[in-house]
Image (cartoon, rainbow, N blue to C red):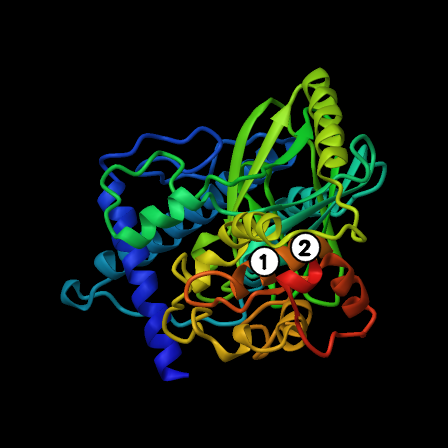
Amino acid sequence: MKSISTKLGFWGTLAMAQGWSLAHAAADLPGGPAVNQLNLHPAATRIAQEQHFLHWMMLTICTVIFIGVFSVMFYSIWKHRKSRGAQAANFHESATVEVVWTVVPFIIVILMALPATKVLVAQKDTTNADLTVKVTGYQWKWGYDYINGEGQGLSFISTLDSSHRRLSDSGDVSKAPNDYLLKVDNPLVVPVDRKVRIITTANDVIHSFMVPSFGIKQDAIPGFVRDTWFRADKTGDYYGQCAELCGKEHAYMPIHVKVLSGDDYKAWVEAQRKMAAARQDDPGKVWTLPDLVARGEKVYAANCAACHQANGKGAGPIKPLDGSALVQGPPAEMMHVLLEGRANGAMPAWKQLSDTELAAVVTFAKNHWSNKTGQIVQPSQFVAARAGKFPEGGATAAASQ
């Protein structure tokens, strides 16, 4: 545990140092963090506006109380100090004092609690949503499934842009863009001025879905379902991050929400449906080795390279795939690892990928770097594996073709 804490502390310090190094070079990111930001993010929803009001109202009340109490205290110390011959008063059981110090704080608490309760109740009212999106936290990316409303049936994974990860790994962030470590391949897209219900859960460990401009922060817990909602007042790009320490890649789990006009959102949904239809793979299709390897290389770059590295050598506790006995052996165990995970989530499960994508990435790993096994895994084998029927051995490329 001590070594893990030390490593987390090191990477946290490194990330902080990188952030400070960018403080004077970067510009404000609309919908995201600003340089030298001291206040909350600019509000893009009514709930966020109410939260800002509560923040400043309570800060003002607390500041006034602080100044009042300490002013009276310091004045009393100075005015009635012993060097001036002041004599302590001797009184007790003052009904007036007891009524005042009971009634006044009670009134203050009520004045603070009423608007806070109103906002809290509104935050939890997820009824009558125009659009419902299931958000699943993975180590370390987000899955978005459009459950109800326009766009129903769409589903995709959102991952940190690979160029940003490479920039972070290089250690040289002097030329980092304004959206450094916030750019993703697939943002969550929603229409403006529509109530969007967000249902959160997680696949492995606890994550937290937070978008400050919307005033939402909801934990995503494995085996549980939580929900929140927002209604964006204006179009634009808004950013957040996982707000729960979820492992070594926690800093690389951004959230990008793109809010479009009604017409643009309809066009986006139509385009996504066409793309999904074009990408739809027949799990019964028999692939050739070169085609699967080419497909698997893309799957590996998007989902696996962040931990196992592009060269397959791994890093620290992350086991290498290049020359691995697991990869070079029969496919059954490797398929099981991909579907079920390993080491209590250190190696996450990848059930969210399609059977073709899983078959492609396994075949790619078995036939890349120094791994020249000639083995090929077909999508149909993953269909059977999901039902608990794993192959006993690996078919060679020649035999499958």
Q: Residue furthest left?
A: 83
Give residue 280's position: percent from left, percent from top. Answer: 75, 41
The residue indicated by pointer 1 is: 361
Give residue 361's position: percent from left, percent from top. Answer: 59, 58
Q: Total of numbered circles in the picture?
A: 2
Of the pair 175 and 401, the residue shown nearer to us: 401
- Classify 382 as above or below 334: above
Of the pair 22 and 226, the residue shown nearer to us: 22
Q: Tell me which amino acid carries mark 2.
A: Leu
Q: Quadrant of residue 204?
A: bottom right
Quadrant housing the N terminus? bottom left
Q: Tell me which amino acid carries mark 1.
A: Val
Quadrant housing the C terminus? bottom right
Q: Is residue 248 left or right of residue 280?
A: left
Q: Secondary structure at mark 1?
A: helix
Query: Residue drawn at (81%, 32%), measured in percent from left and top?
Result: 130
Query: Residue drawn at (70%, 23%), measured in percent from left and top?
Result: 265
Query: Residue drawn at (44%, 64%), measured in percent from left and top?
Result: 308
**What separation in Å lies between label 2 and label 1 (alpha carbons)?**
10 Å
Give residue 66's position: percent from left, percent from top. Answer: 39, 52
Q: Residue furthest bottom?
A: 1
Q: Secondary structure at mark 2?
A: loop
Is residue 296 something one can see in this rendering? yes
The residue indicated by pointer 2 is: 353
Give residue 98's position: percent from left, percent from top. Answer: 56, 63
Specify which label sits upstream in the sequence, 2 or 1.
2
Query: Residue drawn at (61%, 48%), measured in percent from left and top?
Result: 291
Residue 384's label in the rendered image is: none
Of the pair 93 and 4, the residue shown nearer to us: 4
Question: Is the C-beta separation of discs 2 and 1 under 8 Å?
Answer: yes
Q: Is residue 2 left or right of residue 284?
A: left
10 Å neighbourhood of mark 2: few (<14), some, or many (≥20)?
some
